[in-house]
Image (tube, coloured by chain):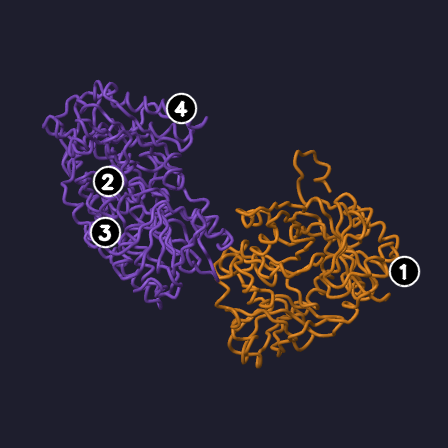
Amino acid sequence: MPPDATGAGKGAFDVVLIGGGHNGLAAAITLARKGRSVCVLERADRPGGMARSSEPAAGAHVPEIAHLLYNLDARVARELGLGLLLKSPPIPAVSLAPDGRHVVIAGDAARFADGTPHPDAPAFGELNARLRRFAGLLGRLSLKSPPRFDGGLASLATMGEMAALARLGLDLKRLGKHEMREFLRILLGNAHDLVLDEMADGPLAGAICADAVRGNHVGPRSPGTVFNLMYRLGSGGAVRLPEGGMGAVCGAFEQAARAAGAEIRTGCDVVRILVENDAAKGVALRDGTTIRAGAVLSSAGPLQTMTLAGIGHFDVEAVRRARNLRCKGTVAKLNLVLGAAPEITGLRGDLAAGRLLVAPSAVAVERAFNPVKYGELPAEPVIEAVIPTLTEPSLATNGRHILSANVQHIAHTPRGGWGDAARNRITATVLSQLERHMPGLKGLVEAAELLTPADIEARFGAPGGHWHHAEMGIDQILTLRPANGLAHYRLAVHGLYLCGASAHPGGDVTGLPGRNSARQLLKDRIL
Amino acid sequence: MPQATRKSHVPVGAIPTPLHARLEALSTARRWTNWAGFVSPLVLDTAEFEYFAIRNQSTLFDISPMHKYRITGPDALAVVNRLVTRDAGRMRDGRVGYALWCDEEGMVIDDGTLFRFSDTDFRLCCQEPMLGWLQETAWGFDADIRDESHEIAGLALQGPTSYSLLSDAGLAAAAALGPFDMAEIEPGLVISRTGFTGDLGYELWTAWDSVADLWDRLWAAGAHCGLRAIGSQALDICRIEAGFIAAGVDFQPAHAAVRLHRGRSPIELGFEKLVDFGKGHFNGRRALLPQRGTGGRHHLARIDIAGFKPAGGALIYHRKKKEVGHVTSGVWSPTTKRNIALAEFRAPYGRTVTDNLWVEIYVNQEGQWDRRIVPLTVVSEPFFRNARSRATPPGPF
């Protein structure tokens, strides 16, 4: 379709997308492939959002925020032309133990790093397989707009969505009485109890609990953490370090978008969404230019998007829900450039390239959640670290290495604010935590870059600095994501859609919210 | 009142208004009710005397318990227009307008009177507590919401001789006020030509602690105008005669209703003229659009019922068989000598289907129940309307 096919005028696009993160790009790919003229507007100087890489020291490329690929659905990857990303083999997780008896987790198998069997391996295998089976059922709901119940059975769209729900019900029945009861028993429960029902507390239980809370403002004892665990397993649970690093992931999204015919403009700060006669008609940029379009998709959070369009265009209740969205970012990112590869006590070289977890026990993970509740800085945070240069040496020149660490449970803004003292304290705490397992690490650090949740919010526009733009919780998923009445990607203004992580199905580098939003837009026949 | 003598750190029980001592001295009926937390008279003497005083003389009713909010600031007009369904931008300064406001589903949260001092200064008077809702509505706008409920007291002076009384009390400047006009007649005293009776009348707004003096001043001037203090029961007959709806009676305020589908839209209540779809977005606009011009699921109408038995709560049937609605407020109108009511119909009854409608009235005659099925007529005009209520300047009746 030519650019002004919708009658939006010369130089106008069918769709303008706010934000060139992977979700904005996924939406652009979907729309461009359907022949729509698409323009992606990115505020930064390059697209990719939280999936892009940065260069804190010359020649060293670190994944700025997201450092691993979880949850990229194979069907969606194929659909978007990103199948290559799934070619690299899944990497194991290594839960570092204070006594050096590290636990290696690969798929449903768990063993000690020295090769000896782990006593809880059978229990873990059974639990993980079961969670994965349950997650697979729920995962299917993530490929479509969430079901809605207000359309009535006369509506064809509602029928289709209800059918998906009915299929889920049927599949649950097919699990058999025992498994279905088990599903319903644990679905809303907490990870701590689930895990400790099956095994003794220790690095294995700690690792599962760390995965259950990652990215969210919860501890393993918080209700809903079993659901979070299942969400992680939604596409099988494989964790990948794609060839070329995470930079290659957003590069692939960007390339696919350009190949599909989407235009990507960087350095474009959208300051206003143009609304005429209750319909979104384009955007205005900070430099004063306007870009007209038949529809606007926004990767920003709901409240940020409403503010861009003007709060007055939205009902008081909708604004209230958007304001009250739970989105307390709790993960800080520490990127280190190292002079050489660190030695990890008790770990063979190839395992060092895995996903390294500092989560010595379920109780330790819960304790690590306590300080953030009171705006304090943790002394022993849960850490997920990777050294991507062990797999991909080309990411850093001169034999240097990079270490990327997600530091869980760091307040968006701690009491007293983010002064240099607080920032240095976090860096020092994380280094000391890692140093226990990597003697001499501190001496290897050539450059360190800390991104607090406040930094993440400022740099990427993520509400609250939250990875997922809105906490993944039972009250903020499916028909309630991001909030009641805002599911289905549509905001009240005609032709205005959410396509970011705050929308269904939620966070992680999945591309699903963007792709689903684009499909909803096409289904709504707005263009 | 035993509560008043008990020592307590917080007020316990219904709160006396600044006029309570005066009302108590006048009350022979001693029938009080709780209005928004305040002690308010249902009847002071007898409802009949009070009703005829409203229609023939002058009456004073203490409306201090009314909730009053001030909306000020550069975005005050935008906030008001975001709130109410009518266009406050088309009201002139110094005007009062009846307004309704809705939730996101287009269901009426409450109705009230909107005072426009300027486009940066409004007052909203209503029945339901509304501070939280107003603050939510104003979020993101440069406007300030102030709860004036306990700062501003009000007196409703209603009746054909009310203007004469005002001028005898030294407030003749009120002559210039047309219906729904308002002005600060004296420093600290705003008079609006508004009321709940459908007749000539005024509402006087002043500071909480000066309302007693105002009462005394009117009372002193009122002897030859037949001034009486009244309770809400007599007023209720007058408001039905005037065709005014009451929150919680003729519609259920959306925020107070617990059950599904108990809310009603302004269009269902008969106020489509007060819904301005062209002014830009207001709360509930998108939900109301499908009702535009076609009506909603329900229809509130004024009806004239055969016979003389008040029909409050009665069910309404089509062809005496199919239940199609019920009476929300019914009363025998002493002035028009008609058996009148407001009734809610299920669409299309009462709106396009207006014939062959029947009211089923149960009458208890000293312990013996009797059922009467009587015909009704849907009426488009208010039951009570007279020229004096609109004459400006008002005549000296």
Which corner quadrant of the image does residue B97 belong to? bottom right
Looking at the image, is B131 positioned above or below residue B304? Answer: above
Distance between the alpha carbons at the discs numbered 2 and 1: 91 Å
Instruction: Select label 1 or label 3 by which is in front.
Output: 3
Residue labelled with disc 3: A256
Q: Quadrant of residue A464?
A: top left
Evaluate whether label 2 is on the same chain as label 3. yes
Q: Residue furthest left?
A: A115
Indicate whether B151 appears above or below A331: below
Q: Is residue A201 left or right of residue B5?
A: left
On what subunit does the disc labeled 4 rest?
A
Q: Which residue is mark 1?
A: B224
Q: Disc 2 or 3, which lies upstream in sequence? A: 2
Determine the secondary structure under disc 2.
helix
Q: Position of residue B329 (x, y in %)?
A: 64, 66
Q: Colour of chain B?
A: orange
Seen in the image, is A84 located left or right of residue A209? Answer: left
What is the crowding at mark 3: few (fewer than 14 residues within 10 Å), some, or many (at least 20)? many
> What's the distance in space between the residues labelled 3 and 4, CA to CA?
41 Å
> Residue beneath label 4, please?
A420
User: Which lettered chain is shown in purple?
Assistant: A
The amino acid sitting under disc 2 is Gly
Badge 2 vs badge 3, beta-carbon distance below 8 Å: no
The reply to the same-chain question for discs 4 and 1 is: no
Say above or below: B342 vs B28. Answer: below
Q: Say which residue label 2 marks.
A: A247
- Looking at the image, tell me whether mark 2 or mark 4 is earlier in sequence order: 2
Q: Position of residue A336 (x, y in %)?
A: 26, 27
> Closer to the camera, A266 or A383?
A266
A95 lies above or below B142: above
Q: Are discs 3 and 4 both within one chain? A: yes
